[in-house]
């Protein structure tokens, strides 16, 4: 029950998130080679990348979203080939994989086709993939901006990659006002009746989330499940505190 997933996408358009999406779309449209999206854990980087992916698709761009956590350079290239619909042979070397990627992106550029690569958990890769970023940046220059890389990270990036980044895009904690709007909007998205959650319960959600989009999401989902399971239940501050203590959602 508590593992239920939301079937349709949802995105909270706070001023922070809207500005970040706009900046990243600008980078993609301008054909910049690389940009970092930085923010602490739980600030919404993964959700933001999915929103950028959806917006880029609306503009007719191809997008490839890869979580690079625990990937080495070769594994990353295999994932990239899959995202670009390249079917390499099992015995192909890393150099051959890079050649296949270069040829595919160059061919797309001849058709005036833009490709946006979205890399999540960038600094959690198993090894340094900066050489692959340099390689993709070189393709960007050769194709007049036909490929753009957007990488999300929690920690500070290496200086050489910071210099390569076209601009700085940072996600910050949500303000209490934005956090309240997030909670109310997301509860509505979950079809939680307005009279099922009291104002002081919303206050607890805001306080315990500490401006984290991920924590806000978890708390609201907890409320949604509780209301669905127990009809006519009214969630007040006391009930919500009991629920979070029982489920370890703090």
Image: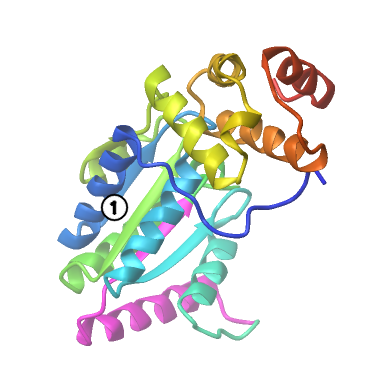
Above or below, 232 relative to 200 = below
Q: Residues within 10 Å of mark 1 (few under 14, many from 20)?
A: many
Write down the region rendered in magenta. 91-119
**196 relative position to 144: left or right:** right
Residue for point 29% across, 75% down: 60
**Left or right of 63, for residue 85:** right
Q: Position of residue 197 (x, y in %)?
A: 62, 26
Is 103 a magenta residue? yes
Above-or-below relation of 96 to 157:
below
**Chosen colour scheme:** rainbow
The residue singled out by tag 1 in the image is: 34
Residue 155 position, x and y percent, is 46, 30
Q: Residue at 42% of width from left, 47% of height from top?
A: 48
Locate residue 51: give its quadrant: bottom left
Quarter the C terminus occupies: top right
Magenta span contains residue 79: no
> Is residue 129 in sight in this rendering?
no
């Amino acid at each position: 029950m508590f593992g239920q997933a939301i079937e349709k996408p949802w995105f909270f358009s706070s001023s922070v998130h809207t500005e970040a999406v706009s900046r990243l779309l600008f980078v993609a449209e301008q054909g910049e080679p690389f940009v970092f999206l930085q923010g602490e854990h739980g600030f919404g980087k993964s959700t933001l990348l999915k929103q950028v992916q959806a917006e880029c698709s609306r503009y007719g761009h191809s997008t490839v979203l890869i979580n690079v956590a625990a990937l080495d350079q070769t594994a990353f290239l295999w994932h990239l080939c899959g995202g670009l619909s390249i079917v390499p042979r099992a015995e192909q070397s890393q150099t051959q994989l890079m050649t296949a990627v270069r040829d595919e992106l160059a061919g797309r550029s001849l058709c005036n086709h833009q490709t946006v690569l979205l890399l999540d958990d960038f600094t959690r890769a198993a090894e340094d993939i900066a050489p692959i970023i340099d390689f993709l940046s070189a393709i960007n220059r050769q194709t007049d901006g036909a490929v753009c890389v957007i990488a999300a990270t929690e920690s500070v990036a290496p200086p050489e990659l910071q210099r390569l980044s076209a601009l700085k895009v940072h996600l910050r904690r949500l303000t209490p006002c934005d956090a309240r709007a997030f909670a109310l909007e997301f509860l509505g998205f979950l079809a939680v009746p307005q009279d099922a959650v009291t104002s002081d319960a919303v206050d607890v959600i805001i306080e315990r989330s500490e401006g984290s989009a991920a924590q806000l999401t978890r708390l609201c989902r907890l409320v949604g499940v509780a209301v669905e399971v127990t009809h006519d239940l009214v969630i007040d501050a006391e009930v919500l505190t009991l629920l979070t203590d029982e489920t370890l959602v703090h």
